[in-house]
Image (cartoon, helix red, strand yellow):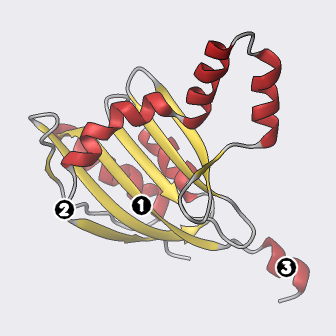
Amino acid sequence: MSGAQNALAPRNTRGVVFIHCCPAAIAPHVEWALAGVLAHPCKLSWTAQPASPGQLRAEASWVGPTGMAAKMSAALRAWPMLRFEITEDGTAGTDGERLAYVPGRGFHRSMVSANGDLVVGEERLRALLERARSADEFAHGLHELLGSSWDAELEPYRNAGDGSPVTMLHKVV
């Protein structure tokens, strides 16, 4: 493979899908949607979600080409009642990312550094500096850039998942 072809080859990465809150009737559809993206069957280990009685939760590690987190998030957007997060580790040529979804709030997409910190790009910070007219507006803008509202809404669901089983998913490459 030549250098140019190698540069265009998809890079494998890994990540985690956290389905924080899902109605039981939707669980098979979530597995079907993820299987469509991964191109092979997907069986998650569902457990009760203590933060929301009657709902389920699951998490799964995945391996596949870069861009999988966005593809999985797009597949799951068909069920707006879900609460989920999908992470994708960075590679030598790509940034990591975290996509979070909360009903009524929508998506929040963040770049993530190698150590797990959220990264806010210079252009986004400059735009905030330009549009904020007060310290309160600036603080609100920073919270939006960091996804603070999404984190606040997801935190009870994250804590309820501590110690839950994790499934391994692989993208056939």
Residue occupying the point 82% across, 31% down: 126
Within the image, what quadrant is residue 127 found in?
A: top right
Residue occupying the point 34% across, 66% down: 41
Between circles 2 and 1, the one closer to the viewer is 2
Which residue, given by chain and number where applicable, does mark 1 sit on?
16
Q: Where is residue 147 in the image (x, y as percent from the top left)?
A: 52, 34
- Tag 2: amino acid: Gly
Which residue, given by chain and number where applicable, does mark 3 sit on?
5
Label whose residue precedes the other's in the sequence (2 or 1): 1
> Where is 91 relative to 143, above or below?
below
Local secondary structure at mark 3: helix
Label whose residue precedes the other's in the sequence (3 or 1): 3
Per the model, the C-alpha gap separating discs 2 and 1 is 15 Å
Q: Nearer the viewer, residue 53 or 170?
A: 53
Neighbourhood count class around disc 2 (C-alpha, 10 Å): few under 14, some 14–19, many 20 upward: few
Q: Which mark is residue 163?
A: 2
Residue 33 falls left or right of residue 66: left
Q: Where is residue 87 in the image (x, y as percent from the top left)?
A: 49, 55
Residue 73 falls left or right of residue 90: left
Residue 138 appearing in the image = yes
Q: Which of 153 and 93 is in front in this view?
A: 153
> Where is 143 relative to 26, above or below?
above
Query: Outermost residue, front direction?
Result: 135
Q: Nearer the viewer, residue 158 or 12?
A: 158
> Where is 89 relative to 79, above or below?
below
Local secondary structure at mark 2: loop
Label whose residue precedes the other's in the sequence (2 or 3): 3
Neighbourhood count class around disc 1 (C-alpha, 10 Å): few under 14, some 14–19, many 20 upward: many
Residue 106 falls left or right of residue 48: right
Q: Where is residue 80 in the image (x, y as percent from the top left)?
A: 38, 29
- Tag 3: amino acid: Gln
